[in-house]
Image (tube, grey):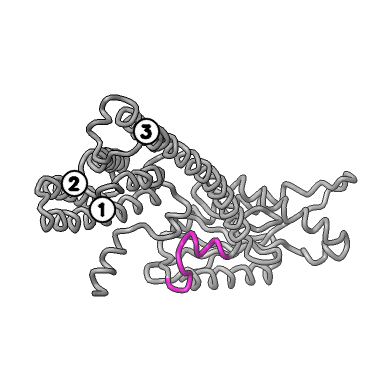
Amino acid sequence: MRKPIRWFRKHLNNWDEMCMDDYARMRSNIIYFSLFVTVFCLVMGIYSVLNGHLMNWVVLWLLGIAYCAVFLVQLFSRKYQRWIALSFGALALIMSVCFLTSEFFPSVSFLWIFIVPHIAVMVASLVDSIMYNSILLLLLMLLYYTPLQQYTADDFPKPFNTMFPISVLVVMGCIYLSEMVRCKLQRRLQTTANDLSSYAFTDPLTKVNNRHALASHFGEIETSDAYGLSFGILDLDYFKRVNDVHGHLLGDQMLVHIAKLIRLVLPANSNLYRWGGEEFLLVLKSSDKRLARHTFEKIRQTVERSPLLTEDGVRIPMTVSIGFHCPVEGMTIIDSIHIADEGLYRAKNNGRNQVVAMEN
């Protein structure tokens, strides 16, 4: 039993998608409702046969087959969702008319109509659901406010015929009021999720990516293949001295300034991460060693020629040391970063303000 359930769930959208994406929510609702209605029609068709209502059996089984087709198409395909929703709604309207004009459930057939407005909102977009419910309301008015009333299955007193369409309209109003609240809550949830994602993957000071973003972009760094990339570790020279002499506030301004300079020079398809403290990780989407050296050397020269200008007009010179590595096949990202880090230490020991390439 677990295998069929697991297979069925595999074709459904997960709960996170349903909460954040309206199309995923409507697709899953169509699948659930069409499956339920299919079973309902087949069971009630058998009930109709046992009670001698052969015409009801034919109608219910035809509706059941149609809903089964909707279920299968939506389960195996994520395309044509709007057309599938329209088909689902058309079948719901046909079923509503059948319930009101045939003795499927004597004296209580009208109760099933109250379910239709709810389902319309859950399986279709707002515009399409309004269209469905407007057509349903028009059908009710035709059946209960015109001579067509003679074709309804149940013979209710006149006050009922007057109030039934009105009560369905009131139900629709309540449904759309709650739908407005749901949509507003969903938008706030999406905004909050985007903000949290930004906080989780962005350094709040420099506004560049942080360590967590690296795994998000390239997978688990301990196991992901590094081939096709180049990794550089950049460190500000004598940054501790800047903090001691000018204060941490100016040190923060220097980090922001450095991040802006790096982003100006980095190729468009590259990534920049604040690796910790005054260190930055640069990832180029190329394993060309000459291109990597040229890019990192250009960054070093740009920083050297762009001192930080304080509010008092003081120009504070800056330099950086960079170690980089271009991995070969079979190396992981974390291995390549460690090798680039060794290059950074060599640059520091060799006098700073230089780029050091590390061999494999």
Q: Which residue has dot 3 on it?
A: 158
Of marks 3 and 1, the one in the foreground: 3
Q: What element carries label 3?
A: helix
Q: Which mark, by number, is residue 37?
A: 1
Do the CB atoms of the residues marked 2 and 1 lie less than 8 Å apart? yes
- Asked which quadrant contains residue 155, the reply is top left
Q: In this view, does 212 lie above or below 97?
A: below
Q: Which residue has dot 2 on it?
A: 63
- Residues 170 and 286: in front is 170
Rendering coords of residue 301 (x, y %): 66, 50
User: Reading the chain from its start, which is encountered first: label 3 or label 2?
Assistant: 2
Q: Which residue type carries mark 3?
A: Lys
Q: Which residue type carries mark 2?
A: Leu
Q: Which residue type carries mark 1?
A: Val
- Asked which quadrant contains residue 153, the reply is top left
Q: In this view, does 117 lie to the left or right of 255?
A: left
Q: In this view, does 253 lie above or below 350?
A: above
Q: In this view, does 93 lie above or below 74?
A: above
- Residues 4 and 112: in front is 112
Instruction: Please identify the quadrant where the N terminus is shown.
Output: bottom left
